[in-house]
Image: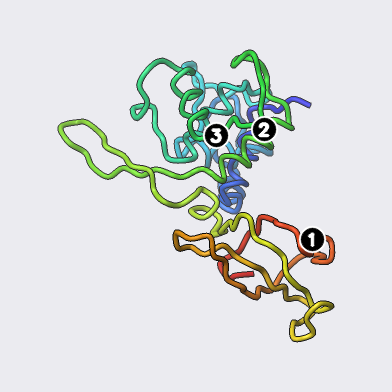
Amino acid sequence: DMVTREEFAKILVTSLKMDTAAKAGLGFTHFKDVEATRWSAGYIGIAAGHGLIKGYPDGTFKPANQVSYAEAITMLVRALGYKDEFLSGQWPANYLAKAGEKEITKKVKFTDAYGFANRGDVAIMVNNTLDAKVVKVVEYTAGAIKYEERDVTLLEDKLNIKKLEDVRVLANKRIDDGLKEDEVRLAVPSEKKSKDSEEKVYDFINDVNPELVLGEEVNVYLNDDDE
């Protein structure tokens, strides 16, 4: 299915862990065609308040309209901290170029930027965006804005989740009875510039079955409790 503008606003706000604020924002509206009681009003309001989405010159948002690739990509690039004034050139080419550079559109194929984005492509682009580095303003000089890329991804910055890549699963309790039922031993690549790895034990949460990936290389996502 295609994704509407209000659906994309919810996807974006939820991905950035701002959905609690969106629920608190119900009853207010930024656009004349978004009723304060509409299910999406809080999501649209939070996204608009953070500069992630914009309406049309006539003061409308057109929430039920399908979102185009250009619109979706623009909102995702803004989620990384980019603003219109950071990017030279005309819209949407400037945002499409930045999205390509940040690999937001990796594995997504579309021939028309103004064509409508489907749910599968939106899922891929949001996932790619979470792995991209965020930017911050570092200087205002004579009206010019200088920004720099931070060494932190959107996933880390907004959701406090760290991604470890190319981690090998070494053992669970069946292999090593020194481990607990909810523990797994991993070979984690060293953060130093070497090919060495170090073994670490982590708790795992949710419905994880380490048996399925024993001996495999995987990506691991750690929360702020190192689980």
Residue 116 % position (x, y): 68, 19
Q: CA distance from mark 2 to mark 3?
A: 14 Å
Q: Which residue is labeled 3 in the image?
A: 103
85 left or right, relative to 142: right
Q: Residue at x 72, y 73 (%)?
A: 184
Q: Residue at x 65, y 40 (%)?
A: 11
Residue 151 % position (x, y): 41, 51
Mark 2 residue element: helix
Residue 103 seen from this side? yes
- Point out the residue furthest to the front here: 195
Residue 176 vs 43, above or below: the answer is below
Say which label, 3 or 1, has the lower sequence index.
Answer: 3
Residue 216 picture quarter:
bottom right
Q: Which residue is labeled 1 in the image?
A: 213
Residue 18 % position (x, y): 56, 50
Q: Which mark is residue 41?
A: none
Along the viewing direction, whichever of 3 and 161 lies nearer the viewer: 161
Q: Amino acid at mark 2?
A: Val
Contact between marks 1 and 2 (CB within 8 A): the answer is no
Mark 3 residue element: loop
Crowding near pointer 1: few (<14 within 10 Å), some, many (20+)? some
Q: Nearer the viewer, mark 3 or mark 1?
A: 1
Q: Amino acid at mark 1?
A: Val
Q: Which residue is labeled 2 in the image?
A: 122
Q: Nearer the viewer, mark 2 or mark 3?
A: 3
Q: Quarter holding the N terminus?
A: top right
